[in-house]
Amino acid sequence: MRFLDLAGVCLAGLASIASAGVVPAERVNAVEKRATSTTTRVPDAACTNGPLTRSCWKNGYSVATDFDLKFPTGGATVTYNLEITNGTCNPDGNGPRLCLLFNGQYPGPTIRATWGDNLVINVKNSMKDNGTSIHWHGVRQYHSPGSDGVNGLTECPIAPGDSKTYSFQVTQFGTSWYHSHFSSQYGDGVVGTMIFEGPATANYDTDLGVYPLTDWYYQTAYQINAITLQNLANQAPPPSADNILINGTNKNANGGGSYSQVKISKGKKYRLRLINTSVDNFIRVSLDNHQLQVMTSDFIPIVPFYTNWLLIGIGQRYDVVITANQTEGNYWFRANVAMDCLSGNKMGALAIWSYDTVTAGTPTSSAFAAAAAGCYEPAGITPYWKQPVPSSQFLNSPLTVSLTRASFTPGGELHVLWAINGSSMNIDWSYPTLSYLMDKNTNYPTDLNVWPSSAEGSWNYWLIQMAPNMPPVPHPIHLHGHDYFVVGCGNGQFNHSTAALNWNNPPRRDTATLPGGGWLAIAYPSNNPGTWLAHCHIAWHVSEGLGVQFVEAPSQVTLPDSAAYQKTCDNWKAYVPTSYWKKDDSGL
Ligand SMILES: *[C@@H]1O[C@H](CO)[C@@H](O)[C@H](O)[C@H]1NC(C)=O
Ligand SMILES: *[C@@H]1O[C@H](CO)[C@@H](O)[C@H](O)[C@H]1NC(C)=O
Ligand SMILES: *[C@@H]1O[C@H](CO)[C@@H](O)[C@H](O)[C@H]1NC(C)=O
Ligand SMILES: *[C@@H]1O[C@H](CO)[C@@H](O)[C@H](O)[C@H]1NC(C)=O
Ligand SMILES: *[C@@H]1O[C@H](CO)[C@@H](O)[C@H](O)[C@H]1NC(C)=O
Ligand SMILES: *[C@@H]1O[C@H](CO)[C@@H](O)[C@H](O)[C@H]1NC(C)=O
Ligand SMILES: *[C@@H]1O[C@H](CO)[C@@H](O)[C@H](O)[C@H]1NC(C)=O
Ligand SMILES: [Cu+2]
């Protein structure tokens, strides 16, 4: 029996590391939809959700409900209208820059719904010079793959002047965000947050709502993306961010701009929903003197744990509870770029948290001791429902991440691009994968990176491996239509006889970090027919081809209404010949 020094290396939170090399007897069970969850709390109809009973919900649902199998029905229909315009923004006072906005604001409005509701979101593209498609990050899109918002997979882009209605049921609860999937457009502001009300594993008095954290650039995402593409040819890093924003604001290097300010009352417990909406930077957050009690990872309720500093990868979310039990005063909330994740340059953002009995002013508080270095998932992530994963030899072949030379257009200029198994992803906006399904066409070009998916009810096992001698940047890997179990990760090349894997109760989430120069082993059951994207959430990397898609149970996919779907495609195809800009990246 061998225990790798996993603690502190990769997933420090693996409390119950299965003994390495020993493959438990049970094999992949073809009918096992989801590892059985066991917890001491059962859904309780009599229990009402309140400050001291947050694990309760209603009608037999609670935080113990496995929402892959069961979620409230008969929810309300909640409608939002979002219009994307080309405007300006100035979040840190550095000066106005071009910004693409939702309803005239950055970040866009918070979409709120309750577990079980049906969301109907009308998106109008009022930009002159870009298509768009809006992805609802982490939403399972059960029976609604046509609302996943991935142009080239689940829809044609929405042409300038056109609108599209996304509709889906809220089968999970917690915190997330939505963003454009049209090239690197989200880096220019096409981002907003989402709150789905539901039960929780920790109690609190007040929900402070979302607290998005992001890197911010003074040039547009399209400009940075172009520079990044040039740099990659020399294995040089992308340009560094110019600032970090907390809840859409911060001071700039010259002192302009303003800090986010939050008021709290002594003795109360506050829920805060942290979301990393960065394009390229990992961020570590902390509130001076106050521990963070972490209770979710992405949409997954976890056994609450306390930490002083919390590392948040791009696309990841953590809901935390903060107890206002310190001397009444002003405290710094800190969001620092995680240098150990090879994220740009050293910088951070500050916010001011004040007790309501004191005059809000500049804090004199000092930071907690620095967190142990290491660009890994935080320690202590244990899902609240205990869900073992049937062990596997990782018989599915490894997906190897490397660099390659490829072009986005036939006969076009060759670029150095990211590739999975030698193939850099490059989608066709005008003929999305769902069109292949509608046309019963399985003749997928290689660069669509369509990988096989296991049969419904059985498990997928992926070993994502960095090729040797690659730039050692970590990649936050995000999966659509599913979340996954993080069975293990480590540095260097995966070795079956030494890798410590956790099959017992592994962390579960929809975005996890592939260590630069290492490997990430994930597992998830096929339980959602559709066509789903898996990609690096660093905007520049997916733009440079770091993605795959898999077509799951094609004959069982709930296709979108074909008239509406075709209308979006027809309008897009009519726009393309007139467009000022042309596609010059993977399209994602
Ligand atoms: C936004 O407006 C600028 C200035 O008019 C223009 O150059 C750019 O193409 C527009 N972008 C989009 C996405 O419409
Ligand atoms: C989108 O608009 C930006 C300008 O805002 C431009 O740089 C980019 O090339 C456009 N991309 C496409 C494919 O239209
Ligand atoms: C974040 O900003 C929004 C919009 O300005 C504000 O309504 C909200 O209260 C802020 N959140 C916190 C936790 O301060
Ligand atoms: C967001 O994630 C990126 C990469 O995953 C990371 O570099 C950055 O530090 C994170 N930001 C925050 C605020 O956690
Ligand atoms: C304050 O709350 C934290 C949990 O957030 C706890 O660990 C700590 O002991 C409490 N401190 C005081 C002074 O009550
Ligand atoms: C990726 O490449 C590896 C190594 O060549 C191969 O074993 C595997 O089958 C490929 N994976 C897929 C999904 O094609
Ligand atoms: C895997 O680890 C074993 C045990 O340390 C070692 O004997 C073997 O050479 C390693 N395999 C590879 C491919 O590195
Ligand atoms: Cu990446």
Image (cartoon, rainbow, N blue to C red):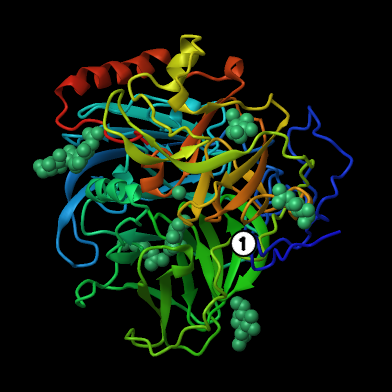
Image height check: is 99 above or below 76?
Answer: below
Q: Position of residue 20 (x, y in %)?
A: 80, 54
Corner quadrant of residue 248 = bottom left
**Left or right of 411 in this view: 338:** right
Image location (x, y in percent) of residue 582: 21, 30
| Ligand 6 quadrant in view | top right
Who is closer to the viewer here, 524 or 51? 524
Q: Is residue 91 visible?
A: yes
Please indicate whether residue 516 sits to the left or right of residue 79 in the image.
right
Q: Position of residue 323 (x, y in %)?
A: 56, 76
Q: Quadrant of the C terminus?
A: top left
The image quadrant that residue 84 belongs to is top left
Residue type (three-letter) at the residue carrying disc 1: Met
The residue that mark 1 highlights is 295
Q: Does the image show residue 180? A: no
Nearer to me, 240 or 145: 240
For the N terminus, give its image quadrant. Answer: bottom right
**In the picture provided, is 213 more to the left or to the right than 302?**
left
